[in-house]
Amino acid sequence: MVQLLKIREQIFRFVGRFEVYVMAGVRFVIAYAAFSMINSSTGYMKILTDYPIALILALLCSFLPTGMMMFFGAVLILLQFYALSNILCLITAMIFVILFCVYLRFSERKGLYTVMTPLLSAIGIPYTMPVASGLMDGPYSVISVICGEVAYFLMKHVSESSALFSSVNEASTNSTIALAATEILMDKEMYLYLAAFAIAAIAVYCVRKLPVDQSYLASVVVGIVVQLVLIGGGEVYLGNSEAVPRIVIGCVVSLAIMLVIAFMTHSLDYSRVERVQFEDDEYYYYVKAVPKAFVLPEDKQVKHIHRKKTRGKKNTKGKKPNAETESEQEDSLEEQVKREFGEQ
């Protein structure tokens, strides 16, 4: 445990020393992965996949606010859908306007949650984000997660029904709208995930606020279990029993990730708990203070000791004087005798 705390403190010191470059690198990696995922899951406009558009946008996002990732991602999705169907692009733009209004009005504006949710959904571990939002922020931050999950299901349904959208586009506008409403807006699985994410984030937030030991770790476990029960049971109810093993594996991986994050951000030392009681004119106060687990990493410094070199001096200790030194001493004695007689 002590070694883990030392490693954590070394990581914090490194990040604190190079915070600007580390955060720029993290934003670049997340943005490039998200933009590449959008192009790979859709790929209807060849110019966006043939040229390094995702790389250029990711470089811009590394120095811009996190909200620009959302904007560039939405633009990429609209351009890809426009190459498939202009009516589909218009419907998607209307959905995005609603999502942006909800995001700006009700959420805590955690754009990173919105970008990472579809990215983690694509690799099968979206259950991490609701727990992270409830653990590190307020309950309203789950709205950012919900907006990202809606965008993921939107891309998922369009990629699965791309042939239908391209064929209906030539027939009539009403058919395209009806197909979009059926495939996107009437998806029960999407609403199941959104409800489970909201309930899990609220549960995590409530449990971590309880005045009990290890409340942060307990909140992580509760959030994952809530999602496993709700989403797994909902998939069985909807007739998608084959999705249950995938959900179980995703929840286990998400639990491991969130335990590491909880250790890095909320590691407390319950062996040194202090309870303080004081009062004023109106209230009695009972305070429980739990110190953070903290270990200073060893800062080893090697001191090199060099021997001084004496210049212009000869070490004659233990050595016999040669003829030159003897003659010099005799000359100096003769000069001293002459000087003394001269003065007399």
Image (cartoon, rainbow, N blue to C red):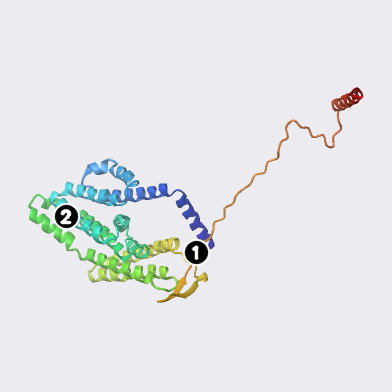
Quadrant containing the C terminus is top right
**Residue count near mark 1 (Cα–Cα under 10 Å), binned few <14, some 14–19, many ≥20:** some
Residue closest to the eye, 154 or 291: 291
Q: Is residue 264 above or below residue 77?
A: below
User: As drawn, is 273 to the left or to the right of 22?
Assistant: right
Q: Image check: 287 left or right of 81?
A: right
Dividing the picture into quadrants, the one containing residue 178 is bottom left
Q: Residue at x 65, y 44 (%)?
A: 304
Pinpoint residue 210: horizontal percent, then vertical percent: 39, 73
Circle 2 sits on which residue? 94
- Seen in the image, is 326 located left or right of residue 146? right
Image coordinates of residue 152 in percent, x first then y, are: 25, 57
Residue 93: x and y in percent read: 18, 53
Q: Which tag is nearer the camera, tag 1 or tag 2? A: 1
Marks 1/2: CA–CA distance:
48 Å
Foreground pick, 192 / 327: 327
Q: Residue at x 35, y 71 (%)?
A: 206
| Crowding near the residue tagged with mark 2, few <14, some 14–19, many ≥20 C-alpha atoms within 10 Å | few
- The residue indicated by pointer 1 is 293
Frontmost residue, 312 versus 52? 312
Q: Secondary structure at mark 2?
A: helix
Going 28% across and 71% down the picture, which residue do you hit? 233
Report the amino acid beneath label 1. Ala
